Image: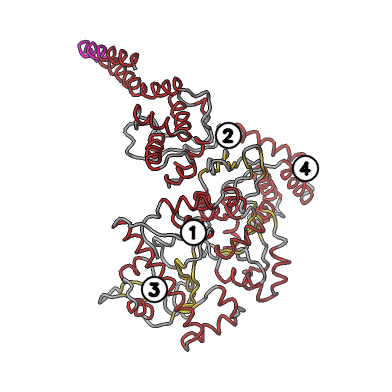
Amino acid sequence: MRYGRIPEEVIEAVLKRNDIVDVIGRHVHLSKQGHYMKGLCPFHSEKSPSFTVTPEKQIYRCFGCGAGGNVIRFIMEIEGLSFSEAVTKLAEEGDIPITWEEATEEQSEQQREKADLLKAYDFAAKLYHFILNNTDQGKAAKSYLVSRGISDKLIETFQIGYAPAMWDTLVQQLEKRGFSLPLMERGGLISARHEGGGYVDKFRERIMFPIYDATGKTIAFGGRSTGDAQPKYLNSPESFLFNKSRTVYNLHQARPHMRKTQQVVLFEGYVDVIKAWEAGVSNGVATMGTALTKEHAALLNRNADKVVICYDGDNAGQSAAFKSIPILEEAGCQVTVAMLPDGKDPDEYVSTYGFDRFVREIIEPAVPSMKYKLLYIRKNFKLHEEGDRLRYLQTAVRMIADLASTMERDHYLKQLASEFPDSSYESMKLDMHEILLQSEKKRTDGDNKPFLWNNVMNNGRTTERTRSQTPALLPAYHNAERLLLAVMMHDREVCERVESQLGDAFNVEAHAVLAAYLYAYYAQNTEPDASRYIAMLQDEQLESLASSIVMMGAGHGMNDQVIDDYIRQIRKVPMQEEIERKTEERVRAERAGDPLRAAQIAIEIIALEKRLKST
């Protein structure tokens, strides 16, 4: 394990060795349009391509969601990796040796703790796996797994293990190998003893399912009780390695198959995923018993367009499926739901009917989300009673009205009309049009949330505006700063000139930060290189902003006079704002009956206006 910062020359080699078109082309179908490559953005759902790759600058930019950066940022976003992990991955793919600089004491400690904990989790997974397969303690658990249809091959593929009933099997082994037990406890691997001090194993007498991060490193465990211990399933607590709301089981193995098929099958538990794998469903993942979150949905959508929900067939499972649909659809997923009969769960269905029938009769004929929702809400109404039947139809029409596609709305209305002939298609369509009309009246303009540069120490500067806001809607100084930065990114001499005349006096905080990085970049490099400059930023919002600015190019009729005008315009802003503040202060003094104070402020305003004219 290495510690510290990756040297600049390694980052530079990674950027040179990994052409952005080749790397992004593995994940996005790109087509050439002039000097650019275009495709559908992998980070949000869209039908018209707004995702642009610029080979000359080695950057990408989505004009729909604002994502942008260089090849390192793309790998970070698409695979959920840290900066160092993304550089390491690209370096290994490019056969580039990685060496690390000396880190600060704080960085070294944090990285060392993470590395030690990852090493400990890897060791624990191997220990539990060995105990299951090679000891008397694991025989009963192994027999149980075999009885559930989990073969030796599956046990090996998913590295299933067993934690014995003793209190300190893992603690002893960790201590013997020199691991810090307080760190192991903070990382959720062991527990502090309540009485008498010391530590005990967190998992005892449980079948152990390792939980991996996106790169295949063990970061947690799920344990199924083989005795009377409760709960039946127990996950590792959250730690600086493991966040339950952002982790799905088996993603590291399922991801290649998800991307190939653009489909993921979403289960509730480990065993469902494992048994489905044997059935050939190699794109299955699970949320490990926790409710689906927006982070889960976004993670799935980054890797596949379609989601098949395959939850348990009982009331709890079907309710969870119903609640998951809007979360997945909001993330941009196309959702279908597998219908399991008689309250069975996927594991039981496979065990009862076999692998082929599970795929053929459950996964492949999964129903569209709207059909499932209509079927699900029916149980709340007594359809043989006229009043309840009408209420069901009214509820169903409101749900159908939420569909974006006119064709889909018409399809489901016709289905309702054929199922309930006492209610005509025309009357339901009229009701739906009224719902749509009311919805249109309530709708507010726009759906973009503010995109703010998050820095509490901004020295009074304004923040960067929303991603979608066009330059025409922004103040003149804002546009001047962006255009000036665009030229600076392409021209070292202009950057040096701006540094000497303006320094960090940009009025938008994010622009000031980008300028500071540009000054630092040119202090180390003679030639402009957008991709290498963006690699310095290591911040998603800054990289996105820099990408949008560099795409503006260095044209716009730039010459020395225009650059000087921009600099003057930017420098005037603080004085203009001070004049506005002084004017308000003078008005308040006049209203308060203090003419002497008002006159004094008026003199200050005149002096500021003179300075402003001479700037």
Q: As rendered, which of 427 and 168 lies closer to the eye?
A: 168
Disc with the residue nearer the chain's start (3 vs 1): 1
Is 484 inside the magenta-drawn segment? no
Residue type for callout 1: Ile
- Residue indicated by mark 3: 202
Residue type for callout 3: Lys
Q: x, y percentage for residue 81?
A: 48, 56
Is 598 inside the magenta-drawn segment? yes
Q: Which is in the foreground here, disc 4 or disc 1?
A: 1
Q: Which residues are magenta?
A: 591-603
- What scheme was used to colour the molecule? secondary structure
Marks 2 and 4 in Cβ contact (< 8 Å): no
Q: Which is in the foreground here, disc 3 or disc 2?
A: 3
Classify residue 398 as left or right of residue 170.
right
Marks 4 and 3 in Cβ contact (< 8 Å): no
Residue 313: assigned label: none
Question: Counting other residues with Cα less than 10 Å from the Cα at mark 4, is it few (<14), some (14-19), or many (20 or more)?
Answer: some
Residue 443: assigned label: 2
